[in-house]
Amino acid sequence: MIYIASTKENVGLIKEDLYIRDHFLANGLDATIDTIDNISSKVLKGDAVILKSIWGYHLEPDVFLNQIESINNSGARLINNYNFLLWNFDKLKYLPELKEVNTVPTLELNLSELIHESDILIKLKAISKLYKNDKLVIKPSVSASGYRTFLLDFANEPSLIIHDMLSSGISKFMTQPFREEISHGEISVVLISGELMYGVNRYPGILYRKDTSEIIEPHKIPQEILSQTDIVKGFFIEKFKSLPIICRIDFLKHGEIFEILEVELIDPDLYFRVLDNNYLNKALSTLLNAIKIK
């Protein structure tokens, strides 16, 4: 059985899940969409579990980690595998490992080490000075879908943002300099089994206006992005001796260079919904072949 893991609110509602299930069924494979909670309680050795619309896993990280550990211990095949998922869980841990590529500068802000709001403000001003930027993007180091993402502008009233951060109940945040170029969107590349499928010009809409995402054909992806993507693939081979089955790498242009914002391995939106039939069929077929190979 191939399980496509979702959440109770998303089961059977997400196009990407449905595309995968229906393509697998049409090719003679047993596939179903179910909640990750149900899957972790009944999965068997030899099954495969694709994490696809489990949005919200970061809200109960310990529960999620227990679920994927249970699936891994069952002998089922996790997509992506357990080691990739653990590596990708905390951005403050994995981003510094990508030393050979350009990443958006990232520093930790641990609220548990700061007693008063004034101490937090002093720390943020010091970080801002290091970045040479009066605007900071602040978000939890374990997060997804723009959860608790703040834009702090020292020209406005930073105490309101600090208050919201403190009231969130989260202690471990990451800080990055705000890039004005984000108004033009991010460029993401989607890889399946290490093969570049396509790019996507995307506007997640957390810090800026939200537009429709558009596919970028592989030959139109900037060469610098392609080169950095190859370096990340080399990193995976060196560290894990393999490539993840599904992967999305998000880039943001800064001046004349591109910086990596995130590498998404846990539950990457692959933007199947923006693809024409040719690209969609190729992506689904590549994924199916990757699942069938053991």
Image (cartoon, rainbow, N blue to C red):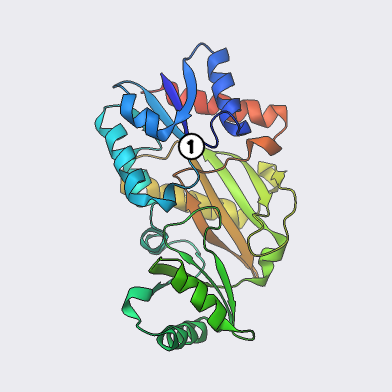
Q: Is residue 228 above or below residue 122?
A: above
Which residue is at a point 64% across and 25% down the rendered structure image? 281
Indicate the position of residue 79 as horizontal and vertical percent values. Answer: 41, 34
The image quadrant that residue 222 belongs to is bottom right
The amino acid beneath tag 1 is: Thr
* Farthest residue, direction top: 28
Q: Position of residue 289 (x, y in %)?
A: 48, 23
User: Tag count in the figure?
Assistant: 1
Mark 1 lies on residue:
7
Viewer-nearest residue: 289 or 238: 289
* Residue 271 shown left or right of residue 140 in the figure: right
For the point 43% across and 52% down, the residue is: 59
Residue at 72 percent of width and 56 percent of height? 210
Q: Residue furthest left?
A: 73
Residue 184 seen by the camera: yes
Under tag 1, what secondary structure?
loop
The residue depicted at 68 percent of the width and 44 percent of the height is 219
In the rendered image of this protein, does residue 218 appear above or below residue 293?
below
Measured as percent of width and height from the top left, residue 160 is found at 56, 79
Pick the quarter of the image with the C terminus. top left
Left or right: where does residue 78 sit relative to residue 136?
left
Residue 241 visible in the picture: no
Quadrant of the drawing holding the N terminus: top left
Depth check: give the residue in front, 246 or 89.
89
| Image x and y of residue 98, in percent | 41, 60
Q: Residues within 10 Å of mark 1 (few under 14, many from 20)?
A: some
